Amino acid sequence: MKERSLSGEIISRCLKVLGVSYVVSALMLVVIAAAVYKFGVSEKVVAIGIVLVYIVSCLVGGLLMGKLMKTRKFLWGLLLGVMYFVALFILTGIVGRGFSQIASDVGTTLFLCLGSGMLGGMLS
């Protein structure tokens, strides 16, 4: 019975931190959208901003996971990066025109999410 409550608590923590990461993403995307609207920034700047959204969101999530879990922090940060990427991949496939449009950037995005999540865990 104790194992169930421990695993449930771990899942709950992971989902809460993932939620925080997506709130950070949403806030940063609003800033990018405002910059596009107000200043008419180029697509190249928007693309760089989106990469920064991935990095900062997973870094923050990794930091929080490391702080919450206290041991093997880098692995928890890595797990957060995996969860962020999987959710991002699924949402992009559903909201977009399908998975084929994001296939070219999957490797880079996966690396950014995993690396920054793990770095956040290590820094916590």
Image: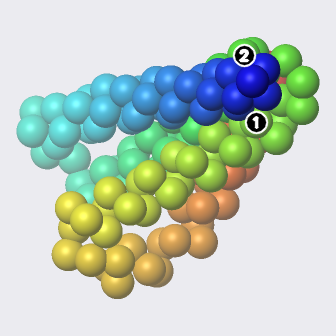
Query: Going by the image, does 120 lie left or right of 72?
Result: left
* Residue in the picture at 38% in, 62% down: 90
**Residue 108 shown left or right of residue 46 in the figure:** right
What's the residue at 50%, 24% (across, down)? Answer: 16
Q: Which mark is residue 105?
A: none
- Circle 1 SS class: helix
The picture places residue 28, in percent across and down from the top left corner, at 35, 31
Contact (Cβ within 8 Å) of mark 1 with mark 2: yes
Q: Is residue 7 left or right of residue 86?
A: right
Q: Position of residue 50 (x, y in %)?
A: 39, 49
Say whether residue 44 is visible.
no
> Vertically, is 102 above or below 113?
below
In terms of secondary structure, where does tag 2 sit?
A: helix
Give the quarter of the image for residue 108. bottom right
Question: Which residue occupies the extreme right position in the image?
Answer: 71
Bin the neighbour count of mark 2 within 10 Å (Cα to Cα): few under 14, some 14-19, many 20 and up: some
Q: Residue beneath label 1, please?
A: 76
Which residue is labeled 2 in the image? 68
State left or right for residue 17 relative to residue 8: left
Residue 61 in which image quadrant: top right
* C-alpha distance separating marks 1 and 2: 9 Å
Which of the image's four quarters has the N terminus?
top right
Q: Which amino acid lies under the numbered mark 2 shown in the image of this protein?
A: Leu
Q: Which comes sooner in the sequence, label 1 or label 2?
A: 2
Above/below status of 60 relative to 48 = above
For the residue marked with disc 1, what is the amino acid? Trp
At x 22%, y 47%, the residue is 41
Which quarter of the figure is the C terminus placed in?
top right
For the rendered model, the colour scheme is rainbow
Q: Nearer the viewer, residue 82 or 63?
A: 82
- Measured as percent of width and height from the top left, residue 68 is found at 72, 16
